Amino acid sequence: MHARRWMRENPTNEEIVAMLEEYQRDLEEEVANVAGRIRRLREEREEMAEA
């Protein structure tokens, strides 16, 4: 988990923002991966229907 990166018990606002921005980037990458998987599955389904 991202919280382990904090070296002290009470992170500053800047540290929290940095952690949340990194988490957001990770989530955006995961969303893109899921969208790509859905697209590929739909393409495969269409190809199979045409065959």
Image (tube, rainbow, N blue to C red):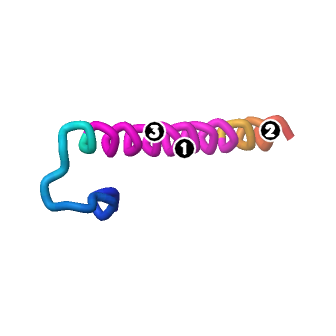
| Label 1 with label 2: CB-CB less than 8 Å | no
Q: Position of residue 29 (x, y in %)?
A: 53, 41
Mark identifier at residue 11:
none
Q: What's drawn in magenta, residue-wise?
A: 17-41
Mark 1 residue crowding within 10 angstroms, few (<14) / some (14–19) / many (20+) = few
Q: Nearer the viewer, mark 1 or mark 3?
A: 3
Q: Is residue 12 above or below residue 6?
A: above
Which image quadrant is residue 27 in?
top left
Give the left or right position of residue 38, taking residue 12 as reference: right
Q: Which residue is mark 2?
A: 47
Tell me how far mark 1 sits from mark 2, CA to CA.
20 Å
Q: Secondary structure at mark 2?
A: helix
Q: Earlier in the sequence, mark 2 or mark 3?
A: 3
Q: Which residue is mark 3?
A: 25
Q: Secondary structure at mark 3?
A: helix
Q: Position of residue 50 (x, y in %)?
A: 82, 35
Give the left or right position of residue 5, taking residue 48 as reference: left
- Looking at the image, the residue that sits furthest to the left is 10
Which image quadrant is residue 23 in?
top left
Mark identifier at residue 34:
1
Disc 2 residue type?
A: Glu
Disc 1 residue type?
A: Val
Q: Earlier in the sequence, mark 1 or mark 3?
A: 3
